[in-house]
Amino acid sequence: MTITHRNFGRFAPLAAIFLAVLACTSVVQAAEASPSLSKKELKALSETPAGHQRLAAYYREKAQHLRAKAQEFSAQADYLATQPATIESKEGISCNCTSHYRYFSKLYAREASEAETLAAHQEQLAQEYRSGSTESTHQ
């Protein structure tokens, strides 16, 4: 075996791991890049019933995205709970991070619930805005 083959044998697994991590990182960044609204846009949208409806749709979409993330983290936690512990800490206690995935699953579920509440509030505001404008028209 030549020196070239030996060096390639050492670095090929490292290169494969690096490429896999790079690919996973870019996929996560693309998935998490959800459109957000600026304060200026929020203010402009909150002035009309159609704007409130649009805000409600935005918050519902955000809630749906967060619920999906919560389910992904929950599924990963369930999977890791069935696997043998492979990582050991300095204290000798093994950890496969199930608790971390459960924590983030609960966090995303709570944020999804908050987004749903905001969506319902925006729909209520739009309805009140419409009923207020129709009452003033009839008077």
Image: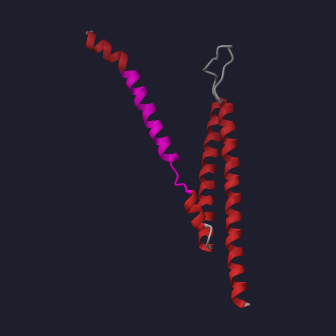
Above or below for 2 versus 112 = above
Above or below for 83 versus 34 = above
Q: Residue at x 60, y 43 (%)?
A: 72
Above or below for 122 versus 38 = below
Magenta region includes residue 13: yes
Range of magenta residues: 12-38
Rendered location of residue 38, percent (x, y): 55, 56
Rendered location of residue 67, percent (x, y): 64, 50
Magenta region includes residue 127: no
Q: Residue at x 72, y 90 (%)?
A: 138
Nearest the camera: 123 or 24?
Answer: 123
The image quarter containing residue 95 is top right
Above or below for 81 versus 4 = below
Q: Residue at x 68, y 68 (%)?
A: 123
Rendered location of residue 88, percent (x, y): 63, 17
Q: Residue at x 64, y 17 (%)?
A: 89
The dominant secondary structure in magenta is helix
The image quarter containing residue 104 is top right
